[in-house]
Amino acid sequence: MLKVDIRKAFDSVNWAFILSALRAIGVPERFVGWISECITTPTFSVCLNGNSSGFFKSTKGLRQGDPISPYLSVLGMEVFSSLLHSRFIQGYINYHPKTSGLSISHLMFADDVMIFFYGSEASLHGINEALDDFASWSGLHMNRDKTQLFHAGLNLLKSSAIARHGFPVAALPIRYLGLPLMHRKLKICEYEPLLDQLIGKFRGWAMKSLSFAGRTQLFSSVISGTVNFWISAFILPKTCIKKIESLCSRFLWSGTIDGSEGAKVAWSTVCLPKKEGGLGLRRFSQWNSTLCLRFIWLLFSDSGSLWAMWHKYHNIKSNSLWEISESPRDSWTWKAILRLRPVAAQFLKVVVGNGSSASFWFDNWSPFGPLIKYIGADGPRQLRIPLKAKVKDACNSAGWKLPSPRSDVELNLHAHLTTIEVPSSSATQDEFCWVVDKVTDY
């Protein structure tokens, strides 16, 4: 993997490149002219020893703080994204073995790029050429000192070959968009930046002598947002959650995290809804699990999530999420998601259309819940329907193809199936729904 850093992306981009990119995506010439006026006409002044020394015009770059600048910058990087994709398709760069099945060449957020490629000198040479071509078009050059190369499992010959390109070699874990990238459980040193960030905020607010209501409002807005950024990506360790809640409790009751005043009410009570006597604050341990349930929903919904597609291809494969087991090679987050399946099963239901997506045995498409639990582990043998069968595999043009019932549960299933339509290939796709009942234990 090559983590590319672009040098001064806003300051060095060529205007002609931006305008050409706008025309390439079909922006009307009138709008291109307006945008050209916005980015080419501003003047600047330098203040030296307290005195400005006149105004001058720039010849390239986008202004920081201009509302249109981020959009134009992203448009420019989209050109690089298309260039990389075409070089992979043409064979100048080879896919990484773990990304070839889904043709994932890179991930990009603004000007932060991670390129996944097969660890060969030829592929790295192809990436170098793509970066040079993009720099000649746009004026955006790679910062070679900050660009990092990550590799593993290469022999000495291959390692020496790719080292000739002069990229600094780094090792995982690294931080990307402020979060650590790793597959194992977070250690104290890895979630410490989150704690330090919260401590800094609390100490800054302590100097302002905020009221109890003001401190409560800051929890709902600032602290929740900061913690949510982490817990929407990780299952945080219980130790980390306890430390966060301890900091919040101390600041709420004493206005500082350095005081020794004890909590007047347990934090679990503080986090109750207001109608139940609490302050309506979020309990981070529960909220962490709730946000991770969203990952399970992505695996079933037609969201186009790249994360979901990757896990379906590598971890789920032709199986159902409900039947796969944990593997020692699985990441900490994936294991945590698998452990949340009993909770997700309470909410995830299927409206059968053509029956091509819903699992006959594992998905909740009947009033009896998952049939593998209702009928039992011997169900596939008794009903002569394979364990991996979809709902459509249990019927044909003549109707449901089930043997005569031998038990009360099979009789109930037969009786229900006679009341519903047989899935047809002309029907709509199966629809997965997240259904929250009025009364739930979660």
Image (spheres, rainbow, N blue to C red):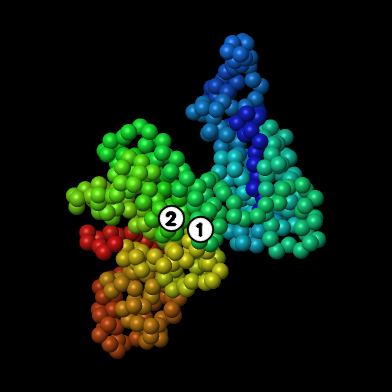
Residue 40 falls left or right of residue 360: right
Which residue is disc 1 drawn over?
186
Residue 350 picture location, percent across and down = 34, 65
Which residue is disc 2 drawn over?
240
Pointer 2 or 1: first along the chain: 1
Q: Amino acid at mark 2?
A: Cys
Question: Is 426 above or below relative to 167?
Answer: below
Residue 169 falls left or right of residue 78: right
Q: Residue at x 66, y 59 (%)?
A: 96
Which sits in the foreground, 148 or 256?
256
Q: Amino acid at mark 1?
A: Leu
Distance of mark 2 from mark 1, alpha carbons? 9 Å
| Quadrant position of the C terminus in the picture | bottom left
* Residue at the front extreme, as displayed: 260
User: Total label count?
Assistant: 2
Residue mark closest to the camera, 2 vs 1 = 2
Residue 387 falls left or right of residue 269: right
Which sits in the foreground, 270 or 345?
270
Which sits in the foreground, 29 or 284?
284
* Residue at the bottom extreme, as displayed: 406
Q: Quadrant of residue 287?
A: bottom left
Q: Secondary structure at mark 1?
A: loop
Q: Residue at x 39, y 40 (%)?
A: 202
Q: Quadrant of residue 157?
A: bottom right
Q: Are marks 2 and 1 in contact (CB under 8 Å)?
A: yes
Residue 317 falls left or right of residue 156: left
Q: Secondary structure at mark 2?
A: helix
Residue 319 picture location, percent across and down = 48, 72
Q: Quadrant of residue 52?
A: top right
